[in-house]
């Protein structure tokens, strides 16, 4: 039965139904629904609109209309700019929407008020006066603060008191006319009233230095040597000699050696004479150049350009700091100081130093020394993948950094948080001695390594191409970076001698975080780093090291000498040959521990065998003509101390000493990554520590730190296309059994980088907490050296790289005083017989 017939067929239900709006369905009387009027009014000092749902009310324009009885009407109030909605009255209350169910005519009032804006007036100066406003509200002295509607134009008028003058406005107004303020926000205005003044001027004379101060305040000479005081004021001057000087006397308006009391009835001049004592030394700063800047001293005394000479006791250690003005560059010291850092002096006689300030901007020529150091076999995800978690833990502002996705935040700069990466592992049904059988159902996730020693994972030509895509080793399709676990497992099971404990390649997915590598995380955060810095080639150490030396491997994919057909050495031009031709000094520092080279006078012919320069014929030239350029690592520290650091320096990894951070090649000889990081810190800290020495190499140096290649550890970012260095294709692929032999593709040439590697730049000019997202491979370091020393490119590969100047701000050095990094943690366990 229809619901209308159900109600209409029951006497009592029908009565109720007839009271309802749908009574017409039962024929229960009249079928006409009455209309009721809803009226809206606006009140208050402000303005706004009221609209209804259903439509009909749009007040301002339409403020009253009728709706069918029983209709529920919702009113919404929207204040105009400069107004606020104060609330409803009548049929509604509160400040939300207004809902009215119309059973009779109804009226609602919406109150809008102007948003008040505060205007505050202050009076300062030695005189008196009043400030009034139009429209009224301010009458200061008495009423110095008042509220006006937002957007109101208020005019302030200053009237000086008897014997005073109005000196002018400051704050929201300037000048001496009336002050017109249009109030869009709270504003403050200061009116200055002064009594008539006379000028008191202090001059210094004599062979020494000192300061003169006044009571009441105004004179503080050196810095402020002239000030106005009210006519008739009594001013007392006090002279204080600097260390090494004595106050001799006053002249001009005063005499004698006590305080100088002057009653000002006219402009007045006083001279204070300071002379050096027998042990006094005068230090003078004389600026040069087309620019401008300031120089200050510690201990105090010099504050140039106001005070450019000061007396100090003989033997005083004085540190001078130069700061260029806007649009100006500090070009360096001359005299007893050099370089771009602070000037550190021990005063033995009267001395003059010259800071040079030049107009215009600085550039890469501010760097006079470049130090380069590459460790071994770490991917960015393995090493710095937890960077954004480190920032969050240490209250460092977040920014884009493409590390492991599980450490990204859920909001902010992309990339944002993602699932933990997981790669196919080995089929558990095929354990050793079987080779690893690819198993997409057995996923190995990214995980935190607790041990700081890991078994080696191979970055060689075949493995690196399998890492690209297990199903596509030659690059016919986009990279998936899915082969890392499989290649690590394969190498573990076929490791010469004893197979590795981790026969399933799980170690390839491990990473360390900022608690494990606290020094390097701190340095990469404090200075400039990159999340798009790649190893040059999809191959192993030797090949990538040759690219770091000559921007090519001469067509080799395997280490030179891998088979009998290899040439003994490469004839390619190296960066060191270019430096020699240009007359640029350089050294290569080698750690002799474990090499068999004997000291104390280490032979270059022995040390060079632990360098990758040995792979090039130019090594023979060096041994004949400049063997001193191949030096033991101890010389790096003595060169910093003795002022003999070359213009370019490369520090070789301490591989034979087990400090290169390489994965452990044997379970019998674990390599500790924390020990390697501590070793790295000694070179960086030694350079930074020169900031407090007379040589101060820190002031004009850059140290570039990276890794030679990713070492077969997982990274989620794919290799990038780059030009072939010299058009030479691979020349040493074996006849069978190697990737790119039976099948070829885009990655079978030297036209792709390898995987990402950790990287940071340490320098007083390095940008703070800077992350580059520009794609580059490690031959950009060669481009950086070439750019600084005006050298030609070695190959098309380094020519195509960025010059790395984006990592620096030469006009505003942000690390003139280097940071104090933490000591590298050495407390983590080192083991190879279990995971993690």
Image: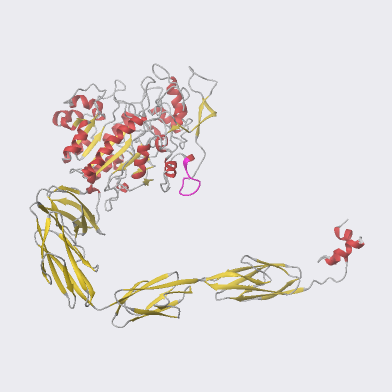
Looking at this view, is 229 or 154 the one in front? 229
Colour scheme employed for the rendering of this structure:
secondary structure
Instruction: Find the magenta span and give its range.
Output: 407-415
Picture coordinates of residue 13, whole percent (x, y): 88, 61
| Image quarter of residue 533 | top left
Is residue 750 toward the left or the right of residue 620 in the image? right
Is residue 446 toward the left or the right of residue 344 in the image? right
Magenta stretch, overall SS: loop
Q: Quadrant of the N terminus?
A: bottom right
- Going 22% across and 44% down the picture, which residue do you hit? 692
Is residue 572 toward the left or the right of residue 493 in the image? left
Q: Is residue 304 above or below residue 443?
A: below
- Going 22% across and 73% down the picture, which residue do you hit? 228
- Going 37% across and 46% down the picture, which residue do you hit? 771
Picture coordinates of residue 713, whole percent (x, y): 42, 31
Looking at this view, is 79 or 167 the one in front? 167
| Image quarter of residue 45 | bottom right
Q: Is residue 794 visible?
A: no
Looking at this view, is 223 or 87 the one in front? 223
Q: Is residue 578 above or below residue 41?
A: above
Q: Is residue 724 visible?
A: yes
Looking at this view, is 227 or 833 the one in front? 227
Picture coordinates of residue 457, whole percent (x, y): 40, 27
């Amino acid at each position: 039965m229809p619901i209308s017939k159900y109600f209409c067929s029951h006497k009592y239900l029908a009565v109720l139904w007839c009271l309802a709006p749908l009574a017409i369905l039962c024929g229960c009387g009249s079928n006409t629904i009455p209309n009721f009027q809803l009226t809206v009014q606006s009140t208050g000092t402000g303005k706004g609109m009221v609209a209804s749902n259903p439509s009909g009310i749009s007040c301002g324009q339409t403020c009253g209309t009728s709706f069918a009885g029983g209709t529920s009407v919702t009113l919404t109030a929207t204040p105009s700019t400069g107004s606020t909605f104060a609330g409803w009255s009548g049929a509604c209350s509160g400040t939300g929407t207004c809902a009215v169910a119309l059973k009779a005519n109804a009226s609602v009032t919406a109150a809008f008020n102007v948003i008040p804006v505060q205007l505050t007036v202050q009076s300062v100066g030695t005189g008196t006066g009043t400030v009034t406003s139009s429209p009224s509200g301010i009458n200061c002295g008495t009423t110095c603060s008042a509220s006006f509607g937002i957007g109101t134009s208020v005019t302030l008028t200053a009237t000086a008191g008897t014997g005073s003058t109005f000196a002018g406005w400051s704050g929201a107004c300037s000048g001496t006319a009336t002050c017109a303020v249009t109030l869009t926000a709270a504003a403050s205005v200061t009116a200055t009233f002064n009594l008539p003044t006379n000028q008191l001027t202090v001059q210094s004379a004599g062979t020494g230095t000192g300061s003169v101060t006044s009571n009441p305040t105004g004179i503080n000479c050196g810095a402020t040597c002239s000030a106005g005081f009210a006519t008739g004021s009594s001013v007392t001057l006090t002279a204080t000699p600097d260390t090494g000087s004595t106050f001799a006397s006053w002249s001009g308006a005063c005499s004698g050696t006590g305080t100088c009391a002057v009653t000002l009835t006219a402009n007045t001049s006083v001279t204070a004479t300071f002379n050096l004592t027998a042990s006094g030394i005068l230090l003078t700063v004389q600026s040069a150049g087309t620019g401008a800047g300031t120089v200050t001293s510690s201990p105090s005394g010099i504050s140039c350009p106001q005070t450019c000479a000061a007396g100090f006791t003989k033997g005083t250690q004085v540190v001078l700091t130069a700061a260029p003005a806007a649009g100006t560059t500090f070009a360096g010291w001359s005299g007893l100081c050099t370089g771009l850092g602070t000037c550190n002096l021990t005063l033995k006689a009267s001395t003059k130093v010259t800071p040079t300030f030049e107009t215009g901007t600085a550039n890469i020529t501010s760097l006079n020394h470049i130090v380069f150091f590459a460790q071994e076999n770490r991917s960015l995800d393995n090493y710095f993948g937890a960077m954004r978690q480190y920032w969050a833990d240490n209250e460092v502002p977040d920014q884009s950094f493409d590390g492991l996705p599980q450490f990204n935040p859920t909001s902010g700069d992309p990339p944002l948080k993602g699932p933990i990466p997981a790669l196919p592992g080995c089929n558990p049904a095929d354990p050793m001695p079987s080779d690893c059988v690819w198993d997409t159902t057995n996923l190995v996730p990214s995980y935190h390594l607790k041990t700081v020693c890991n078994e080696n994972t191979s970055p060689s030509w075949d493995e690196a191409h399998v890492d690209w895509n297990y199903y596509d080793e030659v690059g016919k399709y986009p990279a998936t970076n899915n082969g890392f676990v499989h290649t690590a497992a394969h190498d573990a099971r076929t490791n010469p001698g004893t197979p590795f404990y981790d026969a399933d390649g799980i170690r390839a997915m491990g990473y360390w975080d900022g608690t494990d590598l606290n020094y390097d995380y701190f340095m990469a955060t404090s200075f400039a780093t990159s999340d798009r810095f790649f190893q040059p080639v999809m191959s192993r150490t030797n090949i990538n090291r040759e690219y770091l030396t000559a921007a090519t491997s001469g067509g080799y994919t395997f280490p030179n000498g891998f088979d009998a057909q290899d040439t003994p050495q490469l004839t390619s031009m190296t960066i060191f040959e270019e430096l020699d031709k240009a007359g640029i000094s350089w050294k290569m520092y080698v750690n002799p521990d474990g090499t068999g080279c004997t000291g104390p006078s280490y032979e270059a012919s022995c040390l060079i065998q632990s360098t990758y320069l040995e792979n090039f014929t130019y090594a023979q030239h060096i041994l004949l003509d400049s063997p001193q350029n191949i030096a033991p690592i101890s010389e790096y520290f003595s060169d910093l101390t003795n002022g003999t650091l070359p213009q370019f320096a490369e520090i070789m990894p301490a591989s034979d000493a087990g400090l290169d951070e390489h994965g452990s090649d044997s379970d019998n000889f674990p390599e500790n990554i924390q020990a390697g990081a501590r070793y790295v810190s000694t070179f960086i800290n030694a350079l930074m520590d020169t900031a407090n020495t007379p040589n101060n190499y820190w002031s004009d140096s850059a140290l570039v730190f990276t890794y030679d290649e990713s070492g077969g550890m997982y990274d989620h970012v794919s290799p990038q296309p780059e030009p072939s260095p010299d058009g030479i294709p691979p020349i040493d692929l074996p006849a069978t059994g190697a990737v790119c032999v039976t099948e070829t593709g885009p990655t079978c040439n030297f036209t792709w980088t390898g995987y990402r590697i950790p990287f940071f730049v340490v320098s007083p000019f390095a940008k703070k907490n800077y992350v580059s997202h520009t794609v580059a491979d490690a031959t950009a370091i060669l481009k950086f050296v070439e750019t600084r020393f005006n050298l030609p490119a070695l190959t098309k590969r380094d020519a195509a790289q960025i010059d790395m100047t984006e990592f620096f701000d030469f006009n505003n050095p942000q690390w003139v005083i280097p940071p104090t990094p933490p000591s590298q943690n050495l407390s983590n366990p080192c083991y190879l017989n279990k995971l993690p």
